[in-house]
Amino acid sequence: MISVVGVILFIAVLTIHTLVAAVLTRYFRIRLKTQLGYVIFSFLLIPFVLLILTLLFTGILGIGVNLGDATTATGVMIGLPFALGFTIDTLYVPAPEEYDLPDTQ
């Protein structure tokens, strides 16, 4: 049986994962000068970071609900937040080149 607290904590973990994916995508877009570079780093490093966070939240802290098998858990806890975070930063946040920064002396 799923408890209300378990579902709320599960949604909180998914929100944190999505936020981490969006922030890391933004970081790679700012730091890496090529368009292909941030895509490669995003697709290689963000799922690894989300895997570590998933193991921390669901393993050590015991937060979340039973999703059945490992494939479903991987898709929901890593794939879904990665896709949402990457899409939010790539499509809805202006590119770093579009910001006007003041001149430094």
Image (spheres, helix red, strand yellow):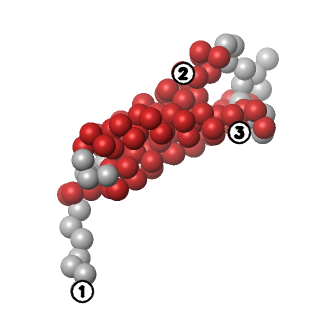
Using the image as rendered, state which of residue 73 and residue 47 is in the foreground: 47
Q: Residue at x 21, y 79 (%)?
A: 103
| For discs 1 and 2, the disc positioned in front in the rendered view | 1
Where is residue 62 shown, x and y percent of the image? 78, 34
Q: Mark 3 points at which residue?
A: 56
Q: What residue type is labelled 2?
A: Gly
| Callout 3: SS | helix
Using the image as rendered, state which of residue 30 and residue 90 is in the foreground: 30
Residue 40 in sight from this viewpoint: yes
In the picture provided, is 54 more to the left or to the right than 99? right
Image quadrant holding the N terminus, namely top right
Which quadrant of the figure has residue 10?
top right
Q: Residue at x 40, y 45 (%)?
A: 25
Q: How crowded is mark 2: few (under 14 residues within 10 Å), some or many (20 or more)?
A: few
The dot on residue 105 is 1
First of labels 1, 2 by sequence position: 2
Q: How far separated are the C-alphas under marks 3 and 1?
A: 45 Å
Q: Name the residue under label 2.
A: 75
In the picture provided, is 31 more to the left or to the right than 24? left
Residue 86 in sight from this viewpoint: no
| Callout 2: SS | helix
Where is residue 45 shown, x and y percent of the image? 48, 39
Q: How far separated are the C-alphas under marks 2 and 3?
A: 17 Å
Where is residue 27 shown, x and y percent of the image? 40, 53
